[in-house]
Image (cartoon, rainbow, N blue to C red):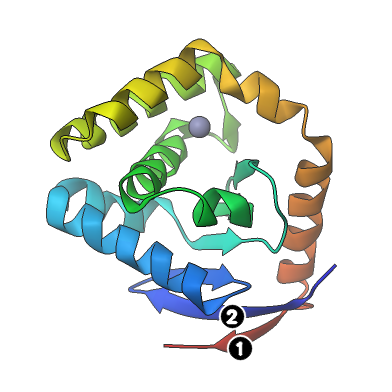
Amino acid sequence: MRKNFLSTKIKSIVIITPEKSLSKKIKDSFLLVKNTDTKEYNNIFNNLNIIFVTNKNGYANEFFMPEKIWFINKSLVKNNNLNWLASLIIHESFHATQFKNGKYILSLDKLEKPATKIQQKFLYKLKDYSAVKDVKTTLKKEYWKEMNEDKKSFIYFRNLLNLLENKKIELKEIK
Ligand SMILES: [Zn+2]
């Protein structure tokens, strides 16, 4: 497992990635949220502490509470456009609001449906109707079930979280 990553900040949020181009893409997505929905933009900073783009391919991602750390495999960042990434940041940020007394109190589909609604609302604001449609389709397919089968990624995220908490990941600061 690679233990060297780059880190940068957007206000209070630490962005950790394996490549500079990925850090830039996350920053650009934040800028898009800022220019589209100021209220949602401000919410993100209450809801997220760290965005960790892994050096692993694949389409899994996982949001850890109470740490407020979102792990996302690099293919998800590389192979999606800014509209979609920005909407996903809002989706994940919303998950933090579903968290009570140290744990998620709802089942997966009850967590995912409202988060996806918020994501769609944002994509409507961007007038990206094809993305709205895509989100609808993946919701119908209950994508979280498919993602849950990617056990390797979830073990990998958990390992990275442990390494991070034990300061065993070398972070090189970039602008
Ligand atoms: Zn979700």
Mark 1, residue position? 172
Q: Secondary structure at mark 1?
A: strand
In the displayed structure, would residue 19 be above or below residue 32?
A: below
Q: Residue at x 68, y 23 (%)?
A: 146
Disc 1 packing (10 Å; few <14; some 14–19; many ≥20): few
Q: Position of residue 167 (x, y in %)?
A: 74, 78
Q: Nearer the viewer, residue 33 or 168?
A: 33
Q: Secondary structure at mark 2?
A: strand
* Badge 1 vs badge 2, beta-carbon distance below 8 Å: yes
Marking on residue 69:
none
Q: Is residue 126 left or right of residue 1?
A: left
Outermost residue to the top? 140
Q: Nearer the viewer, residue 120 or 168?
A: 120
**Quadrant, the C terminus:** bottom left
Q: Residue at x 61, y 57 (%)?
A: 74
Callout 2 amino acid: Leu
Q: Position of residue 99 (x, y in %)?
A: 49, 34
Mark 2, residue position? 6
**Quadrant, the N terminus:** bottom right
In the displayed structure, would residue 93 be above or below residue 5?
A: above
Q: Position of residue 145 (x, y in %)?
A: 67, 19
Tell me where residue 97 sits by quadrant: top left
Q: Earlier in the sequence, mark 1 or mark 2?
A: 2
Disc 2 packing (10 Å; few <14; some 14–19; many ≥20): many
Give the mark count.
2
User: How far apart are the alpha carbons under marks 1 and 2?
Assistant: 5 Å
Q: Residue at x 14, y 57 (%)?
A: 35
Q: Is residue 143 left or right of residue 2?
A: left
Callout 1 amino acid: Lys
In the displayed structure, would residue 103 be above or below residue 6?
A: above
Q: Is residue 129 left or right of residue 54?
A: left
